[in-house]
Amino acid sequence: MSKAAERNLLEVENLWVKFPTRSGVFDAVRGISFSLGRERLGIVGESGSGKSMTGRAILRLIRPPGIVRADRIALAGENLMLLSERQMRSVRGQRISMIMQDPKFSLNPVMRVGEQISEAYRLHADTSRAAAKQKSLEMLEAVKIRDPERVYTLFPHEVSGGMGQRIMIAMMMIPDPKILIADEPTSALDVSVQMQVLEIMDKLVKDRGMGLIFISHDLNLVSAFCDRVLIMYAGRVVETCRADRLHEATHPYTRGLLNSLPRLDAPVERLEVLKRDPAWRNEDSISGQT
């Protein structure tokens, strides 16, 4: 194994996600490859570009008739494609956690918040109910929730959107996974709450030495929050670059996305409309700045 591979928490090689349809097979993700170290990796692109499918495919959450193919999805050197469904259950949550879109609505509406967090912990740790409750209260405090004892007893409909996001982060982080996949976890929040949630995620990831895959359509957010960015179009990675140099990206698709964003420092009367080139669908992935 190379030194680079040893440093990587995750390696994805030639990943495809396919769905049979009446008109033929639809390729939602088409032969993408990337690695993840102890870093914040952003995946950006329009709706339908394959971002969320990539995150789900890593955890093998694509259900039939969907098909996942890959030469290799290696977690700390172990190929997840060779594991049984039973073995994958010990990976999901314990080694890789995923926060879905609008995470508050992923909570069970008829279970108290604390019970759900404790259940997530006890699923992966042989511990008592009292110890699980104490761990859950500590996790609620870690995600900056005031009065965790009170919040522990609430039902999901009794918490705000921002608090719901924090609760889901607590639930996903309590098994102490090595990788967190966050699929647009802040898209339903206002800007001030959004930044608070991102700061919490950032601190937890740094403190625990984790890898983060941050899936988003918000280029400005990703450029400010992540270390490295993959830009996806029609199921392919068309460009990779350092997040702090995203605005120097060269691929015409990335340039089109950036030029369609409003900017306070450079206001224009009319924003550009992205003009797509059919050739982008079939060209090889472009390696950008690293």
Image (cartoon, rainbow, N blue to C red):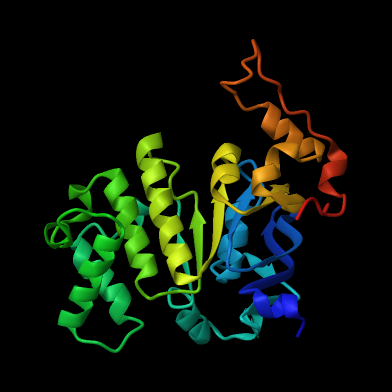
Between 46 and 26, the one nearer to me in the picture = 46
For the point 42% across and 59% down, the residue is: 203
Tell me the quarter of the image containing the C terminus. bottom right
Q: Quadrant of residue 130?
A: bottom left
For the point 31% across and 46% down, the residue is: 162
- Coordinates of residue 89 in the picture (x, y in percent): 46, 80
Q: Is residue 9 left or right of residue 31?
A: left
Q: In the rendered view, would you say 217 is above or below 176?
A: above
The number of numbered badges drawn on the structure is 0
The answer to whether residue 111 is visible is: no
For the point 24% across and 68% down, the residue is: 138
Q: In the rendered view, would you say 274 is above or below 176?
A: above
Tell me the quarter of the image containing the N terminus. bottom right
The answer to whether residue 86 is visible is: yes
- Coordinates of residue 239 in the picture (x, y in percent): 77, 49
Between 59 and 200, the one nearer to me in the picture = 200
Query: Seen from this angle, which residue lies furthest bottom?
Result: 126
Q: Is residue 286 left or right of residue 25?
A: right
Q: In the rendered view, would you say 142 is above or below 261?
A: below
- Coordinates of residue 47 in the picture (x, y in percent): 60, 42
For the point 74% across and 52% down, the residue is: 240
- Coordinates of residue 269 in the picture (x, y in percent): 64, 10
